Amino acid sequence: MTFLARRDYACGELAGKLRERGYDASVVNALVAGLVARRLLDDARYAGHFVEYHRARGQGPVRIRRDLEAFAVDGALIDAALAAIVDWSAVARDVRRRRFGAAAPTDWAEKGRQARFLQYRGFSNDHIRSALGPDLELDS
């Protein structure tokens, strides 16, 4: 209960923490099942809060999905939580604008640098293309 008093946890994350502290797996599984039955643990609620918090921090859906999968959250719950954010391209544009300013990149080197930054943050190639604007002219 001390863990849950601080913040929300995914079932897999809480079970892992308890196993790391030396609790027996059968006891941990029974405890987690009891907490789920009492609605103190809810992976759907956790995934929704996790996605919104990390979106506000400028992280993209690829990175958020990977982090939630590491906590053993069900894929369908992750999909539903990520789908709640309507426009990930707008999020990527906002992240790029906050980091690099309003002006679009003027050369390939700068465009590559900004693309790598957005990729690290967890945005897909489509989101990155949308955030960087139209392709640069090839004749320059």
Image (cartoon, grey):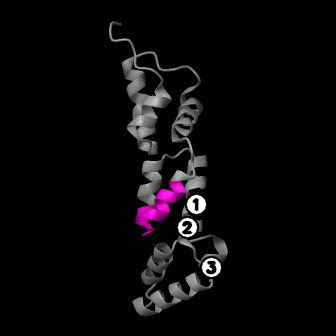
Where's residue 40, x and y in %?
62, 79
User: Of the residues tagged 3 and 2, which is closer to the observer?
Assistant: 2
- Residue underneath mark 3: 40
The residue carrying mark 2 is 44
Q: Which quadrant is home to the C terminus?
A: top left
Badge 2, how many Cα within 10 Å: few under 14, some, many 20+? some
> Farthest residue toward the left?
139
SS of the residue at dot 3?
A: loop
Determine whether label 1 and label 2 are within 8 Å by CB: yes
The image position of residue 85, as x and y in percent, is: 57, 48
Q: Distance of mark 1 from mark 2, alpha carbons?
A: 6 Å
**Label 3 CA crowd tier, 10 Å (few <14, some 14–19, many 20+):** few
Callout 1: SS: helix
Q: Is residue 108 above or below residue 31?
A: above
Does residue 83 lie above or below 75 as drawn? above
Q: Main secondary structure of the magenta part?
A: helix
Give how far across and how far down residue 56 sits, in percent. 61, 47
At a point 42% along the width and 69% down the height, the residue shown is 72
| The residue stretch that appears in magenta | 68-82
As displayed, is residue 48 above or below residue 120?
below
Q: What's under tag 1, amino acid-wise?
A: Gly
Q: Is residue 140 left or right of residue 15?
A: left
Residue most extreme to the right: 5
Q: For the residue labelled by badge 2, is the local secondary structure a helix, a strand or a loop?
A: helix
Of callouts 3 and 1, the N-terminal one? 3
Q: Amino acid at mark 3?
A: Leu
Mark 3 vs mark 1, CA separation in Å = 15 Å
* Tag 1 residue: 48
**Circles 3 and 2 in contact, beta carbons < 8 Å:** no
Please, which residue is most extreme toward the top here? 139
